[in-house]
Amino acid sequence: MKMMRGIDVSENNGFVDWDDVAEAGIEFAIVRSSYGKTGEDEMFLSNVNGAHSVGIQCGAYHYGYGLTPCDAVLEAKNCERIIDEAGVLLELPVFYDMEDADSYKKRHNFEFSYSNITGICRAFLENVKPLDCGIYASLSWLEDWIDWESLGCPVWNAQWMPGYDPEPAPKFDEIRGYMWQYTDKCQIAGRLFDGNVLYLPEGEAL
């Protein structure tokens, strides 16, 4: 199985030296475009343009704060609008980031159920058209809360293995979907990024 190496970034990473990233052998980047119903990542356009300037292909992600499928519809429209207004080419899918890293969902009486979370993902996917879209989540969410197989979309599994290099085979990725975020300690020119691999069928190239 062939793999491409990538990172994901947002405005929280600050200025990214894309020359350093390219020199480190990174071939793709997933760049945060937006979050919630109205949030826009201030570095989205500059990060995509910076990555493209050194030959790195791009996808995007939207951090989800939706508590219900109705919220996810509004989030999808926000994501679609921001990417459309940026006017950039995205060679890779847009991912709906389904997690609760800052406990927003927990603080707002979120219904942690299989039906609600899968329904939220489905609502986003169906309303962000015409963008090619997938789902990002940790292994535990994919196993316990999301019927990801029924969604029929690219799946990006976050299953960190500190210190593990994914070459020559992704032994620790239990989902083995479209993409795997294997660490938050990918070091490039003295800085740490989330490290990812994108799986390519034999004989296929982006």
Image: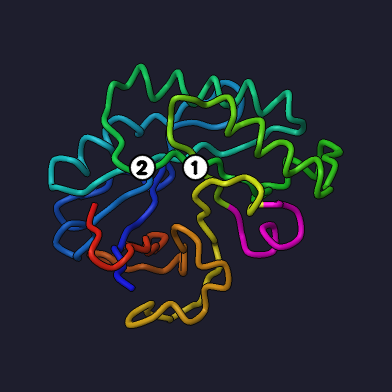
How far from the left and from the top, in percent, is residue 191?
31, 62
On the image, numbered disc 2 is attached to which residue? 59
In the image, what residue occupies the spot 61% across and 31% down? Answer: 124
- Residue 68 falls in image quadrant: top right
Secondary element at tag 1: strand
Query: How far apart are the alpha carbons under marks 2 and 1?
Result: 8 Å
- Please tell me whether residue 171 belongs to the stretch shown in magenta: no
How far from the left and from the top, in percent, is residue 35?
55, 32
Q: Nearer the viewer, residue 84 or 186?
A: 84
- Please tell me whether residue 142 belongs to the stretch shown in magenta: yes
How far from the left and from the top, in percent, is residue 70?
73, 23
Mark before the other along the chain sequence, 2 or 1: 2
Secondary element at tag 2: strand
Asked if labels 1 and 2 touch by Cβ distance under 8 angstroms, the answer is yes
On the image, numbered disc 1 is attached to which residue? 95
Q: Which of 192 and 198 is in front in this view?
A: 198
Residue numbers of the magenta segment = 137-147
In the image, what residue occupies the spot 42% across and 60% down? Answer: 194
In the rendered image, which quarter contains the N terminus? bottom left
| Amino acid at circle 1 | Phe
**Local crowd at mark 2 within 10 Å, few (<14), some, or many (≥20)?**
many
In the image, what residue occupies the spot 69% across and 64% down? Answer: 140
Q: Nearer the viewer, residue 162 or 189?
A: 162
In the image, what residue occupies the spot 72% across and 44% down? Answer: 118
**Mark linked to residue 153:** none
